[in-house]
Image (cartoon, helix red, strand yellow):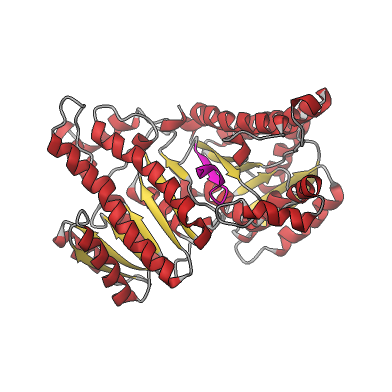
């Protein structure tokens, strides 16, 4: 699947699914602007992405910043365009998880979940769509929700609420900009071997490996996905391979939500 | 997307989405048995794959017959050595509201759109389990499997059933690495749709524009656009997806 001559922005690209997606996109020929808050991890992710470049013309750059800051999102799009000349793809991947039910959720936790998991998608999508409509050649936006965006998230009220919002943000945005040829789709990953899941395994089960094994047993496919398996679905949605898909919610969860 | 070394069965492979999928599979290196009712078309599709890296073989027969479905799997294994992928694509969409639908119309829709899927999937899963290396099943439903199907009660019912057939099947065999997913195409310019548009409109373009105006993306899809999504679901690119429903409808069901 080629992304040759495509330019992309990937948020939350400093670890997990975002980092894997950045590598896969560069390997597939895309020019990718990675972003995230952590400069050091961003540089490591950038190095890995650059290392994935073959002879397909893939390139990578990193801009550290906070996607919950509207002005930064505008700067990020401007920086991507300045560096690579255009913008074709946005992957809204950055997210935060709070492992709390409503009684244990502070105002600050709630507001942080909304800011990172929802508001940042608004700021960054708006900036990206301004650029895409100015180019007049369409575009593709991939929003990362979660299986907990289509099913209830027990003990994770801010996360479940915000990820549900991402699902319908996707559908609404897709309808508004379908006529501009801008496709907007949503990926709902299930369990993925990321730092986020490892922290969850530790907090819920006491130790990481034992916890991950317990989590894997409950998945119909009986395993936890590797970030690359989510990245491949993101690449499909971002590429012209999915040229007729928009407003779709793609669940990639080993069968969890089929039950 | 590489399907090198994979062996597939595609039903309804003699035209439209099934033909496009079979040719794309062969392009990506797969060996494919197609089936369908039109023998002339079947031979033509198989011939069209001769220059491709993979191979297409046509087997004529009625998938509404359980025994034929068993033979189809056996013939595929005999010819190509194994079976990795099944695409349940064949379907009919008879127009009729509930008061217009005859018993025969209803039963035919159930037979082709559901019973055949059951017969062939059972035969395929038996084989995949014997091989012990998993497998991938792609069921082609419709945007009218997700939302109500105006004026097509039998079609809408079968396509909705296919969604939950897929989820249930996925749960039963996930532990053995057999994935089952469902594609829900929106309106696609298949020969069947094209013939109907030519009848109803002065030109095909006028008909396509008429249908396209109801789609958020403003156009109907080409069979190849559906075939690419089938290929994604059939291939290892979607290795963690099972029991999922992929809408490929230009935004129609996002409303």
Q: Is residue B127 magenta?
A: no
Q: Residue at x 58, y 43 (%)?
A: A187
Where does the magenta region start and end?
A: A248-259
In-front residue for pair A253/B31: A253
Q: Where A38 falls versus A116 (above or below)?
A: below
Q: Residue at x 18, y 59 (%)?
A: B41
In-front residue for pair B168/B134: B168
In-front residue for pair B96/A177: B96
Horizontal side of A109 relative to A190 (left or right) equals: right
Q: Percent from the top left, x then y, of residue A62?
A: 77, 49
Horizontal side of B87 relative to A196 (left or right) equals: left
Q: Where A173 falls versus A42 (above or below)?
A: above
View extreme (right): residue: A40
Q: Percent from the top left, x then y, of residue A38?
A: 84, 46
On the question of residue B7 being in view, the answer is no
Q: Residue at x 64, y 35 (%)?
A: A128
Q: Residue at x 83, y 26 (%)?
A: A108
Q: Percent from the top left, x then y, of residue B186?
A: 36, 38
């Amino acid at each position: 699947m080629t992304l040759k001559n495509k330019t992309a922005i990937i948020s939350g690209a400093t670890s997990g699914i975002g980092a894997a997606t950045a590598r896969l996109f560069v390997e597939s020929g895309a020019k990718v602007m990675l972003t995230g808050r952590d400069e050091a991890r961003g540089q490591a992710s950038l190095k890995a992405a650059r290392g994935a470049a073959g002879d397909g013309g893939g390139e990578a750059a990193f801009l550290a910043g906070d996607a919950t800051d509207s002005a930064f999102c505008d700067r990020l799009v401007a920086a991507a365009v300045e560096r690579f000349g255009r913008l074709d793809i946005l992957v809204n991947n950055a997210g935060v998880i709070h492992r709390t039910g409503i009684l244990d959720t502070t105002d600050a936790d709630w507001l942080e979940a909304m800011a990172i998991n929802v508001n940042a998608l608004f700021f960054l999508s708006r900036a990206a769509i301004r650029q895409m409509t100015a180019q007049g050649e369409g575009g593709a936006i991939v929003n990362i929700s979660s299986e907990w965006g289509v099913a209830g998230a027990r003990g994770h009220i801010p996360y479940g609420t915000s990820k549900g919002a991402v699902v319908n943000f996707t559908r609404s945005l897709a309808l508004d900009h379908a006529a501009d040829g801008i496709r907007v789709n949503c990926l709902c990953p299930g369990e993925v071997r990321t730092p986020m899941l490892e922290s969850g395994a530790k907090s819920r089960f006491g130790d990481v490996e034992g916890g991950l094994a317990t989590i894997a047993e409950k998945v119909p496919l009986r395993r936890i996905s590797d970030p690359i398996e989510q990245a491949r679905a993101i690449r499909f949605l971002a590429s012209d391979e999915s040229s007729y898909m928009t407003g779709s919610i793609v669940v990639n969860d080993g069968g969890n939500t089929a039950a | 997307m590489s399907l090198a070394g994979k062996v597939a069965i595609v039903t309804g492979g003699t035209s439209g989405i099934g033909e496009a999928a079979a040719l794309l599979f062969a392009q990506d290196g797969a060996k494919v048995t197609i089936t369908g009712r039109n023998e002339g078309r079947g031979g033509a599709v198989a011939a069209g794959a001769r220059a491709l890296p993979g191979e297409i073989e046509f087997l004529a027969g009625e998938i509404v017959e359980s025994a034929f479905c068993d033979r189809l799997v056996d013939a595929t294994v005999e010819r190509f050595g194994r079976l990795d992928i099944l695409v349940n694509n064949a379907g009919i969409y008879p127009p009729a509201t509930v008061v217009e639908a005859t018993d025969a119309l209803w039963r035919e829709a159930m037979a082709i759109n559901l019973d055949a899927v059951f017969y062939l999937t059972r035969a395929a899963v038996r084989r995949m389990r014997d091989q012990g290396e998993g497998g991938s099943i792609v069921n082609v439903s419709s945007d009218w499997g997700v939302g109500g199907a105006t004026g097509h009660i039998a079609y809408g019912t079968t396509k909705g059933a296919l969604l939950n057939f897929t989820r249930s099947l996925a749960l039963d065999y996930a532990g053995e690495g057999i994935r089952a997913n469902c594609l829900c195409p929106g309106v696609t310019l298949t020969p069947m749709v094209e013939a109907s548009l030519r009848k109803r409109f002065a030109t095909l373009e006028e008909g396509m524009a008429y249908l396209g105006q109801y789609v958020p993306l403003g156009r109907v899809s080409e069979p190849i656009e559906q075939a690419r999504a089938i290929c994604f679901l059939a291939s290892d690119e979607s290795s963690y997806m099972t029991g999922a429903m992929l809408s490929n409808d230009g935004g129609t069901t996002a409303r």
